Image: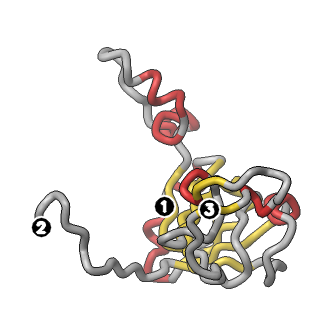
Amino acid sequence: MSQNTFPEGVVFTPIGFVTNNFNEPGDPKSLRNSESIITIDQKFTGALDGLDGYRFILVVFYFHRSKGYQERVHPMGDRSIPMRGVLATRSPLRPNPIGITVAEILSVNGNIIRVKGLDALNGTPVLDIKPYEVHFDSHVGVEREKDPSYRPVDSLCQRK
């Protein structure tokens, strides 16, 4: 594939689903201050090994209730905020309706992850989970990488 050619399509299979009390979009703060359960497909239970050693995770999910793509939106649906390009917002009305949220792990038990802070609706397909690492997931790591002698330390090793 040449550098300027896009693939015809990309297919993802959910690894799990979200369960919570939010069946309709609403107040994002209520959603982010509530608990959700992420049930991972049993065949991926072993892939969760070590996840309970982290405080936060990045949850990558599919906006299964998105009403399509809009080029420009009001951030957070707030009409008092000027419209901007959707790629400069967290809106679900994206070209590819993929969401990413940092959520706090409350517990990991088998294939069940209890979290707080996940802004996904009940039934949302989960595409991936990654441990939140300050080095990779914040500006702190970007700044530290400017020093050629800097070497990140495994966060999980620091917790034990």
Residue at position x 61%, y 71% in the image: 93
Dot 2 and dot 3 residues touching (CB under 8 Å): no
Q: CA separation, marks 1 and 3?
A: 41 Å
Q: Position of residue 78 (x, y in %)?
A: 82, 59
| Residue placed under numbered mark 1 in the picture | 49
Q: Nearer the viewer, mark 1 or mark 3?
A: 3
Q: Position of residue 75 (x, y in %)?
A: 72, 56
Going from the N terminus, do you reach mark 1 or mark 3 first? 1
> In the rendered view, would you say 79 is above or below 95?
above
> In the rendered view, would you say 118 is above or below 89?
below
- Alpha-carbon neighbours of circle 3 within 10 Å: few (<14), some, or many (≥20)? some
Which mark is drawn over residue 84?
Answer: none
| Residue placed under numbered mark 3 in the picture | 72
78 or 136: nearer the viewer: 78
Instruction: Examine the image and state in which quarter residue 39 appears.
Output: bottom right
Q: Secondary structure at mark 3?
A: strand
Color encoding of the figure: secondary structure
Left or right, 8 with respect to 27, comes to left
Q: CA separation, marks 2 and 3?
A: 31 Å
Q: Nearer the viewer, mark 2 or mark 3?
A: 3
Left or right, 31 with respect to 159, comes to right
Identify the residue at the far left of this view.
2
| Residue placed under numbered mark 2 in the picture | 1
Q: Secondary structure at mark 2?
A: loop
Q: CA separation, marks 2 and 1?
A: 36 Å
Q: Secondary structure at mark 1?
A: loop
> In the rendered view, would you say 70 is above or below 104?
below
